[in-house]
Structures are given as C-alpha cells and as structure tokens.
Amino acid sequence: MTTRRWHYLLFAASILALVSTPLWAGNYVIRLAITIAMFSALTLSWNFIGGFTGYPSFSTAAFFGLGSYAGALAQNAGVPMLLAWLLATAFVALFAAGLGAIILRLKGHYFAIGSIGVVEATRLVVASWGSFTGGGDGLNVAFMSGGPDAIARTFLAAMSAIMLAVFVVTVAVDRSRFGFGLRCIQQNEDAAGMVGVNTTAYKVAAYILSALFCGTVGAAYASWTGYIDPNESFSVLMTIKVPVMCLLGGAGTVFGPVVGAAAFILLEEFFWANFLDYNRAILGAVIVVLIFFLPGGLLNMPYRDIASRIAGRLLPRKAVA
C-alpha cells in the first residue's frame, strides 16, 4: 500500500474519531474535537494561498470575522441557520474577490503587511458601526433549541463536515491543472506567466478559496458560541496561529495542514493545563524549534530513516543477548 493511501486511511480514521467523540468522551474532549476540526478547516483554507501559491497571507481573521458577523446578522434577521451560513460564505467570497484583485498586486513582505492591515481595518469598521453590528459591545446570536449535548453534537458534525469539504477541494486542486499553476507561481511567478499561466486569475482564485471556507467556519462559530465581538472575531493571534499550524504540518501538502492544526491544538492544551503561567512562551519556543529543525513540517519527517536507525541500534543488542 502506498504512503498516500495510508495517509487517506489515517485521515478517515481521524474524522471518525472526531465525529464519534460524543459516544465515548465528555464535554471537554468534545469541545476540543470541535476546535481541532475548526482550525483544520481554517488551515486547509490558508494552504491554498500560503502553501500552494506561496503568498504569506495574514488575512484569515478578517475572513473569519466577516463570516461570523454576516452569519450572525442574517440569523438575527430571521434567516434559517444553514442559509445564513451560505449567505456568509458568499459574502466573504465576494469580499475576497474584490480585495484580492487589489492586494495581490503586492508581493513578499509587502503583501504580508497589507494582509495584516486588512484584519485591523475590518475590525475597526465592525467595532465602529455600533448601530448595525453592536460595536464593541458585541452581538448576540440566538441559541439552537435542545440541550448542551445536542448542540455540541450538531456543531461537531458541522465543523467536521466543513473540514471534510475543504479537504476534498484541496485534493481536487492538488491534482488539477489549477494546482499545478499555483505551484508554478510559488516557484517562479515571472516564469509561470511566460509559459502561459494567467498568474493574476490564479492568485485571485486561490485567495478566494482561502477565504471562502473561513467565512463558513466563522458563521458556524457564531451560531455555536451565541456571542461574538470584534476583538475575538478579528483576532490577530488567530491570523498568526493558522499559518504556523500549516507550516508545522507541512505547507503546500494535502495532509500537512490537518496534522499541523491537530498537533498545535493538542500542544496548546497540554502546555495550558500543565504550565499555566508560561504556557504561551513554552508553546512558542517549541513551535519555533520544530519549524526551524523541520522546515518541511511534521509530515515530511524522514520517518523511515529514523525507524531504520533505531532498528539498526536495537537489533545488534538483541542478537548479542
């Protein structure tokens, strides 16, 4: 069985493990599973522009925040929840299409700085428009009917479905001519344009894909929590964590974003539970070390070489014994 098939089987097993957590775990583990599915979807989305295309985007929080507010406002206006999520997704996609045509004229660190500016600009607009968005006081969203257990199961299934949808799109992009064009842009954008790749259209399409599902996740998150505010929805910390997760797992790969998101969330929970006062400092140091020594991410570790070295050291000892 090829390595890729093993990866698909492990991914399917992880989906089953996440979805089945209500059957064998308590509220804490279920909430952790929802968080892993949510950030896996966000990281897979970022991978379109940051991994395949190589543009260091930091505008994830802007798309997430706009999706959460669009979905919340639609629900409060009487739109059914699922339809509100679709409207939020479409709104964020249109926003990304217009923004991408402008901001993608920038490259390198100029693009990175501009994308961070988008997060702050959207946060200020939402925070200032108090008559419509609630401003700094935040916005309440009507809770679903049913008890906490039913709500947890519903949003675990929703976040897992969104993650699966982004993964399917990622596989399709990876195997398509579009994905090949994005990788050409990552390697050498000028050369890609010379051989016939419409670099502008490809970059804008990748930027839209990187925003599309972030809007869906944001709308689902607003329905799940029942309350949103500008500082949390447009958090700069989120827009930094998502690229770090992708780099940790392996940017530009199909499975790397999922591996990186799960590893980051589990490490974050471990250090938060055991080193309350210094958890962020320790987590940051560990992530920096991992990325520095594993530039290709956890997915590209030479596992076979490591296993053969370990076996080479252990087998002679057994033979001598």
Image: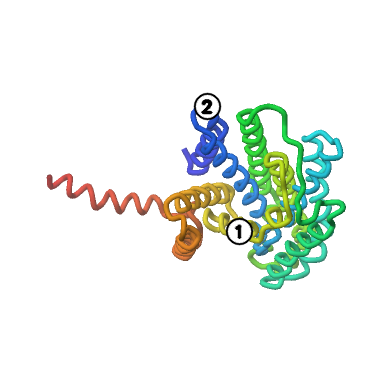
Q: Is residue 22 above or below residue 33?
A: above
Is residue 181 among the parts visible in the rendering?
no
Closer to the observer: label 2 or label 1?
Answer: 2
Point out which mark residue 263 bears: none
User: Where's residue 111, x and y in %?
Assistant: 71, 69
Q: Sequence-wise, which precedes: disc 2 or disc 1?
A: 2
What's the CA distance linking mark 2 and mark 1?
32 Å
Q: Identify which amino acid the numbered label 1 is placed on.
A: Pro
Is residue 175 among the parts visible in the rendering?
yes
Point out which mark residue 243 bears: 1
Q: With 100 as the anchor, is 169 left or right in this view?
A: left
SS at mark 1?
A: helix
**Residue at x 80%, y 57% (from the top left corner):** 126
**Residue at x 64%, y 41% (from the top left corner):** 163
**Residue at x 82%, y 42% (from the top left corner):** 87
User: Where's residue 49, x and y in %?
Assistant: 68, 58
Q: With 232 as the anchor, is 250 left or right in this view?
A: left
Check the image and name the residue furthest to the bottom: 110
Question: Mark 2 sits on what residue?
Answer: 23
Q: How is the image coloured?
A: rainbow
Q: Nearer the viewer, residue 44 or 141?
A: 141
Tag 2 near tag 1, CB within 8 Å: no
SS at mark 2?
A: helix
Q: Quadrant of residue 57?
A: bottom right
User: Where's residue 71, x and y in %?
Assistant: 79, 43
Q: Is residue 277 above or below residue 74?
A: below
Q: Nearer the viewer, residue 131 or 155?
A: 131
User: Where's residue 165, x and y in %?
Assistant: 68, 40
Q: Quadrant of residue 162?
A: top right
